[in-house]
Image (tube, rainbow, N blue to C red):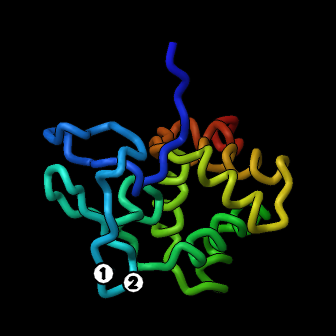
Amino acid sequence: MKANRLALAGSFCWNSDCPDYGLIDHGNIVKYGRTDKGTQRLKCKTCGIVSVANKGTVFYGEHHSPKEILECLVMVAERNSLASIHRIKGIKEETVNTWLREAANHVEVIESLLLANYSLTRVQLDAMWAYVGHKGEKVDIPKRLIGAASGEALR
C-alpha cells in the first residue's frame, strides 16, 4: 500500500485533465512570474495551466497576508475572543471565523506552521481546535425552554 504524504501546492498540476495530474515533483511545474500581490505563479509544462503557489491552502484567495492570518489563529489558540481580535487587529470576527473553518480543513499544515513559528503548546492548539469544533450552525432555542431555564416557567 502506498503511503500518503503531504504535497506542497507547487509540486503538482491541479488540472485533472493533465496527463501529469497527481504526480508529485515530476518536473512539469515551473515558476511563471508573480501576481500583483507577490504570490508566486506556476505553470504546468505539460498542459499549460497556470496556478498560484498558495492554491489549495488556507491562504488561497485571501486579502490578508499569511502572517496576519497565522497571527489571528495564534490569538484564538491563546484564548482571545473573536471580538478582541477584531479590536486589536481590525479584522472582522466573521473573517477570522472563516479562517478557522478553513484551517480545520488543513490541520496538519496549520499545526506545523504554528508550532514552528510561534510559541504555542500542544494544549493551546487542542483548545483552538475544540473552539473551531463548537463553531457550527447556531440552533434556535424555543422560547418556552428559555423561560424554563430562567425560572419563569416555575411561576
Amino acid type, residue under disc 2 in the picture: Gly
Dot 2: what SS? loop
Q: Is residue 13 above or below residue 69?
A: above
Residue carrying label 1: 35
Q: Quadrant of residue 45?
A: bottom left
Circle 1 residues within 10 Å: few <14, some 14–19, many ≥20 = few
Q: Position of residue 36 (x, y in %)?
A: 30, 87
Q: Position of residue 32 (x, y in %)?
A: 28, 73
Residue displayed at 54% across by 35% down:
5
Question: How far is the residue under mark 1 from the one under mark 2?
Answer: 5 Å
Q: Nearer the viewer, residue 94 or 46?
A: 46
Q: Residue furthest front?
A: 27
Q: Quadrant of the C terminus?
A: top right
Report if the CB atoms under discs 1 and 2 are less than 8 Å apart: yes
Residue displayed at 68% across by 51% down:
111
Residue 38's tag is: 2
Residue displayed at 69% across by 43% down:
130
Q: Quadrant of residue 137?
A: top left
Residue displayed at 76% across by 45% down:
126
Q: Is residue 107 left or right of residue 29?
A: right
Amino acid type, residue under disc 1 in the picture: Thr
Circle 2 residues within 10 Å: few <14, some 14–19, many ≥20 = few
Q: Quadrant of residue 79?
A: bottom right
